[in-house]
Image (spheres, rainbow, N blue to C red):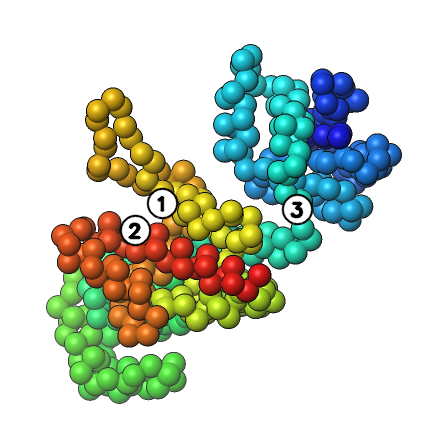
């Protein structure tokens, strides 16, 4: 048995190679993440024989250059959850943390858990791609929220009240935005009130038909009434006003296009996995949330049970006991993927909206918890726990 422990950091890593009983084959040595250096390390590992296993922590994207070359050369690689490694390190008598110490600990972990090391499979690269796409999608969602807040701030000064009339239901699905399209065309109340009411109604209906929105006469008259009574605090005659409004709309539009492109790629990548259709068909999931859910969960085979998946989402409630005291009001640990919790919570909100009649076990459980007097958020979290257990069972049936 030969364990290669690698402490990965940005653009470089510390490597230590050990055999049982503390025999050191390579003292902690730093390598940079270049193709030449990593390939040289891979060749060194291959020369050690077949009983060699590389162990490294999951570090976001930092470990991917190593993983790429090791996988190409068919070297056994096991990727360890940082929390697992932290727990292992806490059992050491001598404390301390440096890259050198960490590489030795990781190598020792490999020896101590030799028969439990799980080999990283090439198929997991699909899940890695999905995870990366999912994280980028979440990043642009945050940008979209910030851009909307910025646009809303400008509209409060150029078209106060217009958001109430034209904003639809909140959704992170990158579709057309009626408010943005309207603002791009009219951009200030002065451009509405300079027309007569009848002329504006005609203009609005022509615009709505062109943009394929409902050309409602009553909506047009409500907008005209609001424009007539509103008090803009940014003048339409100021050169910067039009520029700021249109730039805000343009930026929001570009973010929407990026979100659509990422979502399309997410769906295309996820559709290559055998669990995609099963997950997509689950109540409350659908085309948008299915690839994001799979991206955050990854390969379910890496979880030994449904409870392990629940714990990964940070939804487990650790016991709290001391002497005769037993805690009953426990909170979820939140020691897991916050994005998985957030995506799962969106599924629960969708369930609450659609109120499914088929595949309704999770929805009915949520309603039961609310009927018991639980807060709506607590009920959704409890239902999400149940949802992940069902998810695990259904996907594992496909393996």
- The answer to whether the residue labelled 2 contacts the one labelled 1, judged by CB atoms less than 8 Å apart, is yes
* Label 2 vs 1, first from the N-terminus: 1
* Label 3 vs 2, first from the N-terminus: 3
Residue 186 location in percent, x, y?
A: 31, 72
Residue placed most toward the observer, 202 or 147: 147
> Residue drawn at (79%, 40%), measured in percent from left and top?
35
> Residue drawn at (62%, 38%), measured in percent from left and top?
116
- The crowd level at tag 2 (other Cα within 10 Å; few <14, some 14-19, many 20+) is some
Judge whether residue 274 can be spotted in this image: yes
Residue 135 location in percent, x, y?
A: 50, 51
For residue 197, above or below residue 116: below
Q: Quadrant of residue 289?
A: bottom left
For residue 44, above or below residue 391: above
Q: Which mark is residue 120?
A: 3
Q: Secondary structure at mark 3?
A: loop
Q: Quadrant of residue 52?
A: top right
Extreme right residue here? 47
- The crowd level at tag 3 (other Cα within 10 Å; few <14, some 14-19, many 20+) is some
- Of the 4 image quadrants, the one containing the N terminus is top right
Residue under label 2, please give it: 381
For residue 386, above or below residue 2: below
Residue placed most toward the observer, 346 or 190: 346
In three-dimensional space, the C-alpha distance between marks 2 and 1, rounded to whole angstroms, equals 8 Å
> Residue drawn at (16%, 70%), measured in percent from left and top?
226
Residue under label 1, please give it: 315
Taking 210 as reference, is 83 left or right?
Answer: right
Judge whether residue 188 can be spotted in this image: no
Residue 286 location in percent, x, y?
A: 42, 69
* Label 3 vs 1, first from the N-terminus: 3
Q: Secondary structure at mark 2?
A: helix
Residue 266 location in percent, x, y?
A: 54, 63
- The crowd level at tag 1 (other Cα within 10 Å; few <14, some 14-19, many 20+) is many
């Amino acid at each position: 048995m030969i364990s290669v422990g690698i402490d990965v950091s940005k653009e470089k890593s510390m490597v230590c190679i050990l055999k049982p009983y503390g025999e050191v084959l390579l003292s902690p040595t730093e390598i940079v993440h270049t193709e030449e250096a990593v390939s040289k390390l891979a060749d060194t590992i291959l020369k050690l024989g077949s009983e060699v296993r590389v162990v490294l922590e999951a570090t976001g994207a930092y470990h991917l250059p190593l993983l790429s070359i090791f996988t190409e050369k068919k070297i056994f690689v096991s990727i360890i959850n940082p929390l697992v490694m932290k727990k292992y390190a806490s059992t050491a008598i001598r404390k301390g943390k440096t890259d050198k110490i960490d590489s030795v600990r990781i190598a020792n972990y490999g020896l101590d858990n030799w028969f439990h090391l799980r080999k990283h499979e090439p198929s997991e690269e699909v899940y890695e791609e999905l995870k990366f796409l999912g994280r980028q999608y979440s990043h642009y969602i945050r940008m979209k929220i910030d851009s909307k807040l910025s646009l809303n701030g400008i509209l409060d000064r150029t078209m106060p009240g217009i958001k109430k009339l034209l904003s639809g239901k909140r959704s992170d699905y990158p579709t057309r935005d009626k408010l943005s399209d309207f603002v791009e065309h009219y951009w200030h109340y002065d451009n509405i009130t300079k027309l007569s009411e009848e002329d504006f109604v005609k203009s609005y209906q022509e615009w709505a038909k062109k943009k394929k929105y409902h050309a409602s006469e009553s909506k047009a008259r409500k907008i005209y009434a609001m424009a007539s009574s509103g008090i803009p605090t940014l003048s339409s005659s100021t050169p910067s006003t039009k520029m700021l409004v249109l730039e805000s709309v343009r930026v929001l539009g570009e973010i929407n296009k990026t979100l659509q492109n990422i979502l399309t790629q997410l769906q295309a990548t996820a559709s290559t996995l055998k669990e995609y259709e099963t997950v997509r068909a689950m109540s409350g999931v659908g085309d948008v949330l299915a690839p994001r859910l799979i991206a955050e969960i990854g390969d379910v085979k890496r979880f030994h049970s449904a409870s392990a998946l629940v714990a990964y989402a940070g939804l487990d409630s650790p016991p709290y006991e001391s002497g005769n005291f037993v805690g009953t009001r426990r909170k979820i640990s939140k020691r897991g993927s916050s994005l998985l919790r957030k995506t799962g919570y969106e599924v629960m909100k969708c369930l609450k909206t659609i109120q499914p009649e088929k595949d309704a076990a999770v929805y009915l459980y949520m309603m039961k918890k609310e009927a018991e007097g639980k807060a709506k958020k607590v009920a959704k979290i409890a239902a999400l726990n149940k949802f992940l257990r069902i998810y695990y069972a259904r996907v594992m049936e496909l393996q």
